[in-house]
Amino acid sequence: MKKILIVFCTILFISLCGCNSVKYDYSEISFSLNTDDDGIVLGDIQNSILLIKTKAEFDNYLLGDQFADSFSSEFQTENEKYDEDFFDNHDLIAIIYHATSGSIEEVKISSVRLDDSEVVVTLKKYPTGDIGTGDMGPYFSFYLTIENLEDTITSASYSVK
C-alpha cells in the first residue's frame, strides 16, 4: 500500500508540474545595432520582450530602430524561417537583453512556462569571472518559437537571474 501511495503521489506531482510546461525552441540571434560614426548605439535600445503573432507584426519588428539597416546574412537566413505558414500554428517571441556589465559573458534561456495565457521566460546570466566594465555590457537577442495551435497565448514576460 505504501508503494502504491508513493507511486500515485509521484505521478500526481509530475503531472501537476508538467501542466505549465510549454513546447518551445529557441535560437540566439546575432544582429548589428544601429550606431553613429563613433560607435554609439542609436535608437531606443531597451530590454524588451515582444509576442509576435503574424508575419506583418514580424516585418514591423524588423523595421525597428534597434537594428542596423543592413542585416548580416546569418540574421537574414534566420528571419526567412518565419513566413506566413510558420505563423499559422506558432508564435514568435523576440527578446533583447542588454547586460548591465561587461563582466557578463553569456545569457541563456533557462526556463519557459505558461502562466494562464502568458509565456514567462527566465534568462540566466553567466559571468566571465573577470572584472569588466560596468557601462559596456553586451546585447543578447533570442527568438523563441512557441507552438500555439489553439491561439491561447496573449502575452509574454521575462525575468533575469
Image (cartoon, rainbow, N blue to C red):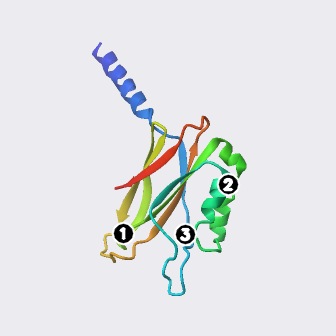
**Which residue position is annotated with label 1?**
100
Label 2: how many residues lie within 10 Å, few (<14), some (14-19) or many (20+)?
Answer: few
Amino acid type shown at disc 2: Ala
Q: Position of residue 1 (x, y in %)?
A: 30, 12
Position of residue 124 in the picture relative to residue 59 (left or right): left
**Which residue position is annotated with label 3?**
66
Measured Cα–Cα span from mark 2 to mark 1: 32 Å
| Label located before the other in sequence (3 or 2) | 2
Does the rendering let one see residue 82? Answer: no
Amino acid type shown at disc 1: Thr
Label 3: how many residues lie within 10 Å, few (<14), some (14-19) or many (20+)?
Answer: many
The circle on residue 56 is: 2
Q: Quadrant of residue 4?
A: top left
SS at mark 1 in the image: loop
Residue at (47, 42) in percent of width and height: 118
- Relative to residue 42, is residue 119 depicted above or below? above
Measured Cα–Cα span from mark 3 to mark 1: 17 Å
Q: Are marks 3 and 1 in contact (CB under 8 Å)?
A: no
